[in-house]
Amino acid sequence: MIQYLFMSNEQTHPLHATDRNIIDSLITKQKPEDIDFINLARLINRYSNFPGETEIKNDIEKTLNFWKISKNQLFSKTKDIWSRSFRPSNTNKDLVGSGFDTSN
């Protein structure tokens, strides 16, 4: 009997644990705030072409459905949020950039 081993192309993203916590907090939000829309949009961008993480991708879709918003509506909304000078708090270092302070 010949056994074939199939290698899966499914990969785990380096930010899986952090992103899992974020999506878990978003998936049941009754009234999402600006930061919630921003977080969901960035997770969509991060995982849209990533080979793997089907569970997170499915939860992103569930969140969109629960919030009754399409990806296009979400991206339009987040563009509007950023255009109103939205800036994440300094306590949310996972949101934007590396958090490297270049002020000196």
Image: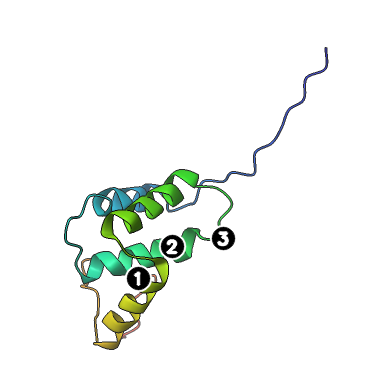
Q: Are marks 2 and 1 in contact (CB under 8 Å)?
A: yes
CA gap between label 1 and label 3 equals 18 Å
Q: Is residue 94 visible?
A: no
Write the residue at 49% across / 47% down: 53
- Binning the other alpha carbons within 10 Å of mark 1 as few (below 14), some (14 to 19) or many (20 upward) gives some
- Binning the other alpha carbons within 10 Å of mark 3 as few (below 14), some (14 to 19) or many (20 upward) gives few
Where does the N terminus fall, quadrant-wise? Answer: top right
Q: Is residue 28 left or right of residue 10?
A: left
Q: Name the residue that disc number 2 marks.
A: 44
N-terminal label among 2 and 1: 2
Which numbered mark, 2 or 1, is in the foreground of this view?
A: 1
CA gap between label 2 and label 3 equals 9 Å
Q: Name the residue that disc number 1 marks.
A: 74
- Binning the other alpha carbons within 10 Å of mark 2 as few (below 14), some (14 to 19) or many (20 upward) gives some
Judge by depth and name the residue closer to the eye, 91 or 26. Answer: 26
| Amino acid type at image mark 3 | Asn
Give the SS element for disc 2: helix
Residue 28 on image: x %, y %: 22, 49
Write the residue at 29% across / 61% down: 68
Q: Is residue 68 above or below residue 77?
A: above
Residue 71 on image: x %, y %: 41, 67
Q: Name the residue that disc number 3 marks.
A: 49
Name the residue furthest front. Answer: 68
Which numbered mark, 1 or 3, is in the foreground of this view?
A: 1
